[in-house]
Image: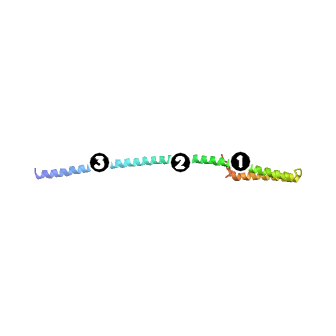
Amino acid sequence: MTEYDLFGYLVLSIYFGFVVVLGMTIFAIVHVQRVKKDLIKFKKDMSVTIEKEVVELKMDMLMVIESELTKLNKDMSDDVEKKLIVLKREISAETEKSLIKLKRDMPLGTEKGLLNLNKSISAGISALVKTMERVVPEKTGALQGKTRE
């Protein structure tokens, strides 16, 4: 072997080494690009999946809140109905007591007695209406101009 042959082998081995390193570098770059593309796709898919889960969770929470509000509204309306019945009884009893007192105190045959009786009945009715509006405003439509459905 001559010195030129050794120099040729050296140049040839450096050349092939450079080609191998260049090939490996290109392969690594292509592989990294593919992995990066797959990672971006996975990230998008995960964000869409997470958004779907968040929306489903919010819908579930809204359904639970709605059912709890319905239960609460039913319980409150039952309580209000009971209070309203009790107040109606109390007011009708008070009105009847004042009517009996009026009948005893004044003779009904006179015009003044009839006028006082009429005023007493009107006062009893207005007291009943005021009490109903105070206790159950949604029944009388006084709550923001809306009636309960």
Side (left or right) of 127 relative to 29: right
Name the mark nearer the viewer: 2 or 1: 1
Question: Mark 2 belongs to which amino acid?
Answer: Met
Which residue is the extreme one toward the left? 1
Label 1 near label 2: C-beta < 8 Å? no
Write the residue at 49% across / 48% down.
54
Mark sitting earlier along the chain (2/1): 2
**Circle 2: is it few (<14), some (14-19), or many (20+) Cα within 10 Å?**
few
Report how far apart the C-alphas of labels 2 and 3 lie in the structure. 50 Å
Write the residue at 75% across / 53% down.
127
Side (left or right) of 25 relative to 66: left
Specify the label residue 27 is tagged with.
Answer: 3
Q: Which residue is mark 1?
A: 85
Report how far apart the C-alphas of labels 2 and 1 lie in the structure. 36 Å
Residue situated in front as seen by the camera: 33 or 83 = 83
Q: Which residue is mark 2?
A: 61
Side (left or right) of 44 relative to 60: left
